[in-house]
Amino acid sequence: MEIDHIPDPRVEAEQHYYNAKHSKLLDLGLQPHYLSESLLDSLMNITLKYRDRVDPTMVLPQVNWREPRNPRRLQANIAAGMSVGAAQVFPAANTKGKSLR
């Protein structure tokens, strides 16, 4: 198995001063149960059995916080801009019978 290393899209530091403690749920009585080795092994076998059904383009990250130009966001902005643009060009169309004065 080969591991592809991709650039880290995050902008924050790897090491951070914030040290979160997840104790409140335990204080409220949560009894955690962990996945067993046999369950993990079973899930891995199923995953390997059907790995040819995976489309890797759908799994790889599409977000890059370091680069402001994201193709998905550009497409969404273009689509939204078309509907917003009409409202800006024709503001009277959005008054719904109200007087402009």
Image: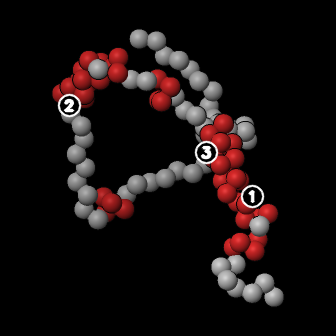
Mark 3 or mark 1, which has the lower sequence index?
3
Q: Which mark is residue 16?
A: 3
The residue labelled by disc 1 is 85
Mark 1 or mark 2, which has the lower sequence index?
2
Q: CA distance from mark 1 to mark 2?
A: 53 Å
Q: CA distance from mark 3 to mark 1?
A: 42 Å
Q: Which mark is residue 21?
A: none
User: What residue is rendered at 70% in x and 53% in y?
Assistant: 82
* Quadrant including the C terminus: bottom right
Whether residue 14 can be seen here = no
Q: Quadrant of residue 14?
A: top right
User: What residue is rendered at 72% in x and 65% in y?
Assistant: 87
The one of 25 and 51 positioned closer to us in this rendering: 51
Q: Amino acid at mark 1?
A: Gly
Residue farthest to the left? 38
Residue 93 pos. (x, y %)? 71, 72
The residue labelled by disc 2 is 39
* Quadrant including the N terminus: top left
Q: Quadrant of residue 41?
A: top left
Check disc 3 and report its element: helix, strand or loop: loop
Check disc 1 and report its element: helix, strand or loop: helix
User: What residue is rendered at 25% in x and 41% in y?
Assistant: 34
Q: Amino acid at mark 2?
A: Leu
Check disc 2 and report its element: helix, strand or loop: helix
Residue 9 as seen in the image, left or right of residue 24: right
Would you call the spot at circle 1 few (<14 residues within 10 Å), some (14-19), or many (20 or more)?
few
Instruction: Please tell me whether residue 52 is drawn above or below residue 58 in the rendered image.
Output: above
